[in-house]
Amino acid sequence: MTDLKSLPLDGLHRELGAKMVPFAGYEMPVQYALGVMKEHLHTREQAGLFDVSHMGQVILRGPDYRSAALALEALVPVDVAGLGLNRQRYGFFTNDAGGILDDLMLANRGDHVFVVVNAACKDADIAHLRANMPEGVAVEVIEDRALLALQGPASEAALSALNPAVAAMKFMDVATVDLCGAECWVSRSGYTGEDGYEISVPVAAAETLARALLADERVEAIGLGARDSLRLEGGLCLYGHDIDETTTPAMAGLGWAIQKVRREGGARDGGFPGAPTVLRELQEGPTERRVGLRPDGRAPMREGVELFKSETAAVAIGRVTSGGFGPSVGGPVAMGYVPAALSAPGTQLFGEVRGKRLPVQVVALPFVPANFKR
Amino acid sequence: MIKFTEEHEWLRVEGDLVVVGITEHASTQLGDVVFVELPEIGTMVSTGDEVAVIESVKAASDIAAPLDGEIVEVNEAIVDEPGKVNQDPLGEAWFFKMKIDDLSELDQFMDEDAYAELIG
């Protein structure tokens, strides 16, 4: 058995009654005393505090922002150079086949690009960056910062009690903010479909900040279990499940993240791994698409459930990549891949659960409308 | 009289029937229950057969028949309101009732003290 790493706030999680489980090489809180259902609903109604310090935080630093941004554009099909100062954007690393190596958040922090990547992929991502950044663009891995997410409609009120400056931030803004005496790098974004913030905080100040937020009666500690059901209802992809090296941006419905300037005919079109495939598919349409799936009955359709065109069809036409119970929806919800011809909302399919073909409808994502501060 | 299995089910004699449910410990471990599937009335089952399904927000689990016998009644109330399994696992949220050959078969199972020791 490999040694699990523990989070900087491990002691606090245990004190709060967290059930700890191994995830991406870390011992992580999967739930606290409230349980997944109440944690999920609390986040949608008030605010939840998530410890996501397992994620990778990386700075790309060149002579100026633009040089680092252009260097990153060789690996991602995203407009990085044109991103405004103190703005954040979603993106992904592609491979030569146009598949997705990892998805990430990137920000223009003035003189550098700040990147947050998935825990399970971070070692590979860092190696990929180190192998591909040109001379003069340094890859700095941030090891001395925790990452906390505060999500939900009461996030603004709770965080601005510590520093009112955060209230003026809009969705996908980033700022350097003093919280509890520490220099924090704050973005107004997250992974729940709710308004909220992600806060990169020096490890030495992380517990003070977490306790200050938890002291607010609107804020509860929320585990990975609810993080997963929240993002699923929000229609957001989980790397390694809904997207991976075999899924392309067009298949995954992530074409919106590829700005015009990187598409055919744009000023900096292509120039990233798999560009011909990725750009052609965006124009012609993929053969398979990621869709929302809403089972008619109560039985959850979880990852791996095979999808069929009819109750009797011999061959599966698709599969569920994420699925479970959506506490805010009040019923089962799922995402999966189906042929493009069967991807229109309203299409009736069948999912095979414990040997039974159960009806499921293709639906538009997200399941719960996003609640961002635009 | 209530008896417990190592699979965290409880069994209670009611007349000539055995009522089966899951323990408080099991319901806590499962987390919030969101789906229950029960066997058909009249099904003949053998010990260990998967007769019911219970799904929480986290995962799906099977409920095995604790004894050979016939399913004679099921609790539709927990199909309509799976959350009852968390609220009252030893009472209102029973799963099914079985008719078995010989009620003395229950002697093989743990009593309350032995079960408490098992879950320690």
Image (cartoon, grey):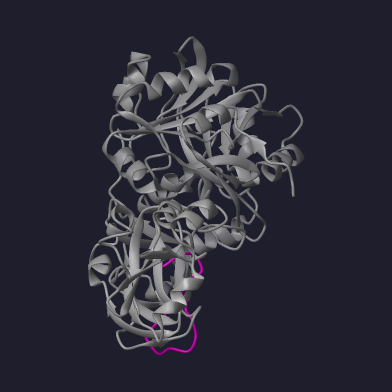
Q: Position of residue A258 (x, y in %)?
A: 48, 48
> Is A314 in front, or is B110?
B110
Query: Nearest the camera: A292 or A40?
Result: A40
Q: Residue at the location (53% across, 48% down)?
A: B120
User: Residue shown at 29%/71% (left/top)?
Assistant: A297
Depicted A309 relative to depicted A3: above or below: below
The part of the image, by quadrant, that contains residue B33 is bottom left
The stretch drawn in magenta includes residue B89: no
Q: In this view, does B103 lie above or below B88?
A: below
Coordinates of residue A184 in the picture (x, y in percent): 50, 19
Displayed quadrant of residue B42: bottom left
Looking at the image, can residue A348 be seen? no
Q: Residue at x 54, y 36 (%)?
A: A80
Towards the viewer: A172 or A362? A362
Residue A164: name its quadrant.
top left
User: Which x, y percent locates residue B22?
Assistant: 39, 63
Q: Does the magenta stretch include residue A313?
A: yes
Main secondary structure type of the part rendered in magenta? loop
- Of A146 and B31, nearer the camera is B31
Report the span colored magenta. Answer: A301-317
The x, y position of residue A190, in whole percent, is: 42, 37
Q: Is residue A350 left or right of residue A21?
A: left
Q: Residue furthest top?
A: A181
- Up the image or down, A260 lies above or below A114; here it is below
Q: Is residue A100 left or right of residue A230?
A: right
- Left or right of B55 on screen, residue A23: right
Q: In which quarter of the image is the C terminus of chain A?
A: top left
Q: Is residue A38 visible?
A: yes
